[in-house]
Image: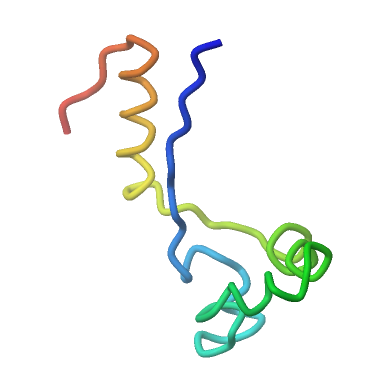
């Protein structure tokens, strides 16, 4: 099928979780400690309990890469 995956890792300030838990909470600083509690615990926090505010300046690089993979020309800057 020719699928390719592009990775974009959000920064803590792009997540609504930082407003809920604060910057020093394990939800922000140690996500693995949440995931070891199981799928349901991780899902409750990171899927159901989170909204994202994507930094479009940072995300642009990923979008440009996707456009190139699709064979489209992209703006230079």
Q: Left or right: where does residue 73 sit relative to residue 31?
A: left
Residue at 64 percent of width and 84 percent of height: 21
Q: How is the image coloured?
A: rainbow
Q: Position of residue 62 (x, y in %)?
A: 36, 37
At 56% across and 65% down in the image, what residue appears? 15
Q: Residue at point 76% right, 75% down?
A: 37
Q: How many marks?
A: 0
List x then y, in percent, for residue 10.
Answer: 46, 58
Q: Residue furthest right?
A: 40
Q: Quadrant of residue 36?
A: bottom right
Quadrant where the N terminus sits is top right
* Residue occupying the point 33% across, 9% down: 71
- Judge whether 47 appears above or below 65 on screen: below
Q: Tell me residue 18's x, y (percent).
A: 56, 77
Q: Is residue 7 above or below residue 63?
A: below
Residue closer to the observer: 40 or 77: 40
Residue 31 on image: x %, y %: 58, 73
Name the quadrant of the C terminus.
top left
């Amino acid at each position: 099928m020719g699928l390719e995956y592009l990775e974009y890792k959000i920064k803590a300030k792009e997540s609504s979780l930082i407003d809920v838990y604060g910057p020093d909470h394990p939800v922000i600083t140690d996500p693995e400690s949440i995931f070891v509690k199981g799928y349901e615990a991780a899902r409750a926090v990171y899927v159901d309990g989170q909204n994202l505010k994507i930094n479009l300046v940072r995300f642009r690089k990923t979008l440009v890469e996707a456009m190139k993979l699709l064979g489209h020309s992209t703006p230079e800057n």
